[in-house]
Image: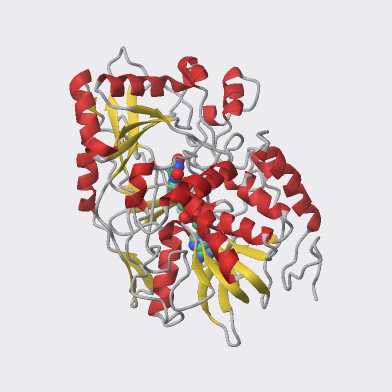
């Protein structure tokens, strides 16, 4: 028996270094108490790579929001957990002494197995921005799924590594359309507050906001929204706002104010590595295998599941294949990752009991981007915080909620930039292409038109009022709308359809979905708070009833 855990519990086949779990505990509590530590200090990780033949009570596929909640709560309930993550650990500084590359200077760390960057804003003032980079298991995946590019985080922390940290709870009146089978009273009284606390959500100090140079772009956004009669709202974020004020004062290393966001944030953002995962590690019951990709899950003879895993090197090459067993498996590979796995496992007969809802109900959260060209008397500022803090709410009247987003180029652009979340009704489906041996998504590029129309309910009106025009230089040559992408993939294993009302997959007791795949395509705002709160709700019920 390989019994080396601090609790004296059994972790057969999983090697672990106890002292590092202790480090995680200390740093985790510092982060949770609001003190910011550099990313590399906060994320010193356990070398706990899973061994071939290992048996684990609970195996979690992916280390994003759903996976991190599951791991923490299972561990707190006394269950040993192993997390398998296809991306890197992101705990080691690169040649420049920093873990993460800057948004303005992408390098090998920036993209998942690409030889050329695929920047969401592909052009600027007529010039293409993309450049060659060495192929590497970098942090941002721009996954091309036919009619849409789906951006996703890769690494320990999932999407929390690359996202803007905007932590938005949907308005109560919109929740019924987001998750129709879930008790809203319980979500708003228990699970949303729990998720917000666990994530470390906070809001910009409104007094500081009024004078901070780095939010001039947001104040211009507010002025234009309000002059056209739209409600302007502050949006909470998991960035450490005290740290940002110190960045502005010049007393700490800059992060949001150095333009860090899309390829990771070296200081102030409370990614999952500093919140849920730090707490999970501190239990001593959670270990993680980075650069390990789950390729198959099937019932094992004698109960539980056999899980096939490929170990990758940083060129993406498989260096080893491992088979392990688990009593329970939690799919937390993100909407796309979980959907692709489940559709493939059903079609190839590995999980024949899955129902025909698997793969259905996928949406893009109605994401669409655009820029507006301001007059010379409306500069948006050369210094822009990479962390957005505000939005324009026209959901009820026009089906659009627009984040007032930064363009942290370091120069004055006279541009206002927005990412809109819209009530796009289209839903796509993943199916298995047996000849190609891969899952495919049937999203059509033209399906973005309703999103454009909804975003126009805000920006046509603002342009008319201000006498301004759309920018045509950000997404190509003479292209107004960023309608080729999403940051917010949702659905594919929808709650109460592909699973029961708590994420238990039909047909295979012991298999669960616990990530954004459960949410049927739209959350009316940025999604990760809802993904986290739903995971909190589901894991509580699963622990109470199944374990
Ligand atoms: P996710 O966080 O994607 O985690 C899934 C993990 O599973 C990843 O680490 C994968 O590498 C891993 N994985 C996948 N397949 C496998 C496999 N086969 N084996 C092992 N590991 C695997 O899932 N949301 C907001 O609410 N606010 C924002 O401000 C915001 N900004 C964003 C900005 C960008 C650029 C992007 C890309 C996303 C943004 N999002 C934002 C979306 C948010 O990050 C996303 O909804 C969540 O991360 C999804 O959480 P999940 O737990 O579903």
Q: Nearer the viewer, residue 70 or 185?
A: 185
Q: How many marks?
A: 0
Residue appearing at x 60%, y 18% in the figure: 249
From the image, which quarter does the C terminus lie in?
Answer: bottom right
Q: Residue furthest left?
A: 464
Q: Residue furthest front?
A: 185
Type of colouring: secondary structure
The image shows residue 452 at horizontal and vertical percentages of: 22, 41
Residue 46 figure quarter? bottom right
Q: Do we see residue 148 in this rendering?
A: yes
Q: Residue furthest bottom?
A: 301
Q: Do we see residue 153 in this rendering?
A: no
Residue appearing at x 74%, y 69% in the figure: 11
Q: Is residue 368 above or below residue 141?
A: above
Q: Is residue 542 left or right of residue 72?
A: left
From the image, which quarter does the N terminus lie in?
Answer: bottom right
The image shows residue 74 at horizontal and vertical percentages of: 63, 61
The image shows residue 43 at horizontal and vertical percentages of: 67, 47
Q: Is residue 424 above or below residue 419?
A: below
Residue appearing at x 48%, y 32% in the figure: 387
The image shows residue 145 at horizontal and vertical percentages of: 34, 59
Q: Is residue 236 left or right of residue 7?
A: left
């Amino acid at each position: 028996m390989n019994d080396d855990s601090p609790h004296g519990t059994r972790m057969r086949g999983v090697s672990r270094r106890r002292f590092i779990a202790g480090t995680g505990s200390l740093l985790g509590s510092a982060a949770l108490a609001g003190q910011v530590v550099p990313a590399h200090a906060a994320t010193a990780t356990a070398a706990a790579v899973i061994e071939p033949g290992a048996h684990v009570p609970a195996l979690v596929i992916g280390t994003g929001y759903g996976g991190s909640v599951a791991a923490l709560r299972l561990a707190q309930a006394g269950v040993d957990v192993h997390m398998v993550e296809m991306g890197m650990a992101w705990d080691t500084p690169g040649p420049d002494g920093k873990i993460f590359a800057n948004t303005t200077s992408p390098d090998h760390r920036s993209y998942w197995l690409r030889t050329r960057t695929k920047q969401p804003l592909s052009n600027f003032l007529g010039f293409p921005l993309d450049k060659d980079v060495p192929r590497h298991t970098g942090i941002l995946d721009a996954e091309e799924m036919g009619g849409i590019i789906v951006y996703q985080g890769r690494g320990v922390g999932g999407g929390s590594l690359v996202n803007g940290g905007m932590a938005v709870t949907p308005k109560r009146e919109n929740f019924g359309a987001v998750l129709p089978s879930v008790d809203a009273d319980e979500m708003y009284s228990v699970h949303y507050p729990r998720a917000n606390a666990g994530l470390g959500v906070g809001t910009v100090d409104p007094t500081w906001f009024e004078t901070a140079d780095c939010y001039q772009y947001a104040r211009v956004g507010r002025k234009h929204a309000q002059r056209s009669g739209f409600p302007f709202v502050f949006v909470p974020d998991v960035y450490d706002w005290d740290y940002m004020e110190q960045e502005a004062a010049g007393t700490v290393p800059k992060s949001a104010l150095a333009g860090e966001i899309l390829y990771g944030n070296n200081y102030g953002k409370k990614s999952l590595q500093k919140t849920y995962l730090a707490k999970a590690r501190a239990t001593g019951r959670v270990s993680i295998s980075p650069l390990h990709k789950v390729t198959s899950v099937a019932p094992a003879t004698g109960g539980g599941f056999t899980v096939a895993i490929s170990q990758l090197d940083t060129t993406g090459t498989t260096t080893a294949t491992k088979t392990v067993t688990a009593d329970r498996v939690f799919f937390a590979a993100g909407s796309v990752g979980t959907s692709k796995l489940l559709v493939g496992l059903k079609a190839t007969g590995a999980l024949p009991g899955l129902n025909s809802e698997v793969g259905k109900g996928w949406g893009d959260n109605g994401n669409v981007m655009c820029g507006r060209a301001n007059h010379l008397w409306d500069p948006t500022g050369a210094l822009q915080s990479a962390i957005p803090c505000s939005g324009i709410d026209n959901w009820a009247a026009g089906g659009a909620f627009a984040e007032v987003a930064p363009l942290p180029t370091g120069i004055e652009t006279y541009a206002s930039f927005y990412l809109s979340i819209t009530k796009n009704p289209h839903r796509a489906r993943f199916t298995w292409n047996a000849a190609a041996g891969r899952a495919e998504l049937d999203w059509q590029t033209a399906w973005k038109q309703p999103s454009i129309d909804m975003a126009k309910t805000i920006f046509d009106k603002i342009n008319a009022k201000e006498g301004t025009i759309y920018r045509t230089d950000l997404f190509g040559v003479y292209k107004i709308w960023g309608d080729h992408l999403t940051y917010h993939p949702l659905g594919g294993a929808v709650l109460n359809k592909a699973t029961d009302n708590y994420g238990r997959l039909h047909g295979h007791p012991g298999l669960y979905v616990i990530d954004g795949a459960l949410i049927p395509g739209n959350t009316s705002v940025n999604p990760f708070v809802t993904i986290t709160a739903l995971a909190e709700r589901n894991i509580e019920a699963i622990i109470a009833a199944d374990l």
